[in-house]
Amino acid sequence: MAERKVRVRFAPSPTGALHIGGVRTALYNYLFARQHGGDLIFRIEDTDSNRFVPGAEEYIIESFKWLGIKFDEGVSFGGNYGPYRQSERRDIYKKYVNVLLDNGKAYIAFDTPEELEAKRKEVPNFQYDASTRNSMRNSLTMPKEEVDKLIAEGTQYVVRFKIEPNEDVHVHDIIRGEVVINSSILDDKVLYKSADELPTYHLANIVDDHLMEVSHVIRGEEWLPSAPLHVLLYRAFGWEDTMPEFAHLPLLLKPDGNGKLSKRDGDRLGFPVFPLEWHDPKTGEVSSGYRESGYLPEAVINFLALLGWNPGNDQEIMSLDELVKLFDLHRCSKAGAKFDYEKGKWFNHEYILMKSDEEIAGLFMPILKEHGIEAPMETVVTVVGLMKGRVSFIKELWDTCKFFFVAPTEYDEKTVKKRWKEDSTVRMTELADLLESLDDFSLAHQEEVVMKWIEDHGYHMGNIMNAFRLTLVGEGKGPHMFDISAVLGKEETVRRMRRAVEVLK
Ligand code: GLU
């Protein structure tokens, strides 16, 4: 048999913001598709109208745009297998529901919610299946005329999948190996509801995977229990030959303790679980996003790629292109992956370091502007070069660097006590005079002249530098002193020194 073209899909339901676990699922699909020269499809599974949330679809599309994950076809991307929004495929599903009804693989059931409820009360652990379906109101137990009559009268019904009991169903999972379950534990799943003329997730999912020629289903572990049913559906349609391969990805776990990562963990521990900020249209609640929190998309991608997969060595920093080369579904773990958000911060720091000072300066500029600072790009690039190693987020650059742009108005009390010696007023006046006399204010020249001055007078180097720092920065932090004075320039340096002397003398 000819090797099948790789076609994978990311198929979210637009029920709210996209969870970070969903982003990882999409990423793994993307890596797999790229690696195999295949296609990545973006399908919207919106057959559950009760859970539809306006804006969710747009939000998901924008998230991937930000992250640099590109789809080949699907909602908003076009393609030859559309429409890609399930709510626009009603006629298709109806046709396939009828196929199953016609070949006896499914049946019509009229049991009302009240009747089902009564049954559940009467029979312990009631399940609608081979052992109970004969005592229910459905097309297997009722005469055909009556069924037709009820339908003609507009009585609501559902279509159920007729699952044959006592059969071992094998799901071959690339990550988990052979998963076997007995069909008797499955219930006769509802595939279609006349009330909204829409299929349920299971039917729509299978029909679309088949029609869209999906070769691999890569999705979260929470869908593993549905997989045997999906295998049976493929078989009921006679589509075994084109059944996709499955890969159920490990869960993302809380950073602390056990259990699935939830939005509450993010709120509790202070990190986003959504790619972008999300404004819930129903509650008005605003949830933080990675983008708005200052993460670089490359860092988020790299961080997520390693939650549940590793390249087999201790390499951690990988670009999207490298990930495409290295990714391997067989190396995904079965066990859940702890969501270590401190590691996420570390990745961001590393990516800030890797990016050029110019690029980071470009991202820092708007923040400076917000604080009313209009500095020349050249200066900002130099400052960023000096300081970016100290931050994990671009926005932290403001607190770390603001002394380059704003002269201190106060002097940190503790530092003053410790660093401003009896002779500091005199020394700093001398130093200000000396610096003012320089024609060449380059870093190298300043350093040379000042070092010589210290040496000639036998001054205490540490004392001079500490006091100097206090005059320019207002506290005891910052990079190399002459880096600071060179950026500030002669005029500003001398002005700050004279002012400090005035205040501290
Ligand atoms: N619509 C499902 C979801 O929201 C898709 C599951 C699957 O990939 O089969 O995740």
Image: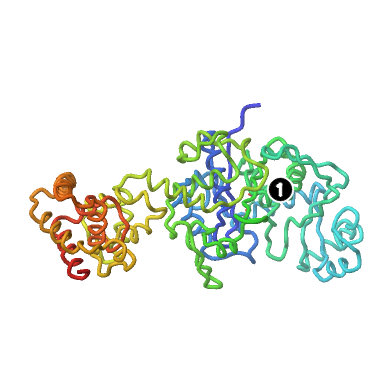
SS label for mark 1 = helix
Dividing the image into 4 quarters, which one contains the C terminus?
Answer: bottom left
Judged from this view, the residue extending furthest toward the bottom is 283
Front-lying residue, 248 or 255: 255
In this image, 326 relative to 254: left or right? left
Query: What scheme was used to colour the molecule?
Result: rainbow
Tell me if mark 1 has few (under 14), some (14-19) or many (20+) residues whose alpha carbon lies within 10 angstroms of its own: some
Query: What type is the residue that disc 1 sits on?
Result: Leu
In this image, 202 relative to 347: left or right? right
Residue shown at 61% from the left, 60% from the top: 262
The percent position of residue 286, horizontal first and vertical second, equals 50, 68
The percent position of residue 357, horizontal first and vertical second, equals 30, 47
Front-lying residue, 59 or 28: 28
Q: Is residue 371 above or below residue 3?
A: below
The percent position of residue 265, horizontal first and vertical second, equals 59, 61
Disc 1 residue lies near ligand 1 with CB under 8 A = no
Front-lying residue, 482 or 323: 482
The percent position of residue 330, horizontal first and vertical second, equals 63, 35
Judged from this view, the residue extending furthest toward the top is 1
Residue shown at 83% from the left, 47% from the top: 183
Q: Is residue 386 above or below residue 329?
A: below
Residue bearing the label numbered 1: 224
Dividing the image into 4 quarters, which one contains the N terminus?
Answer: top right
Q: How many marks?
A: 1
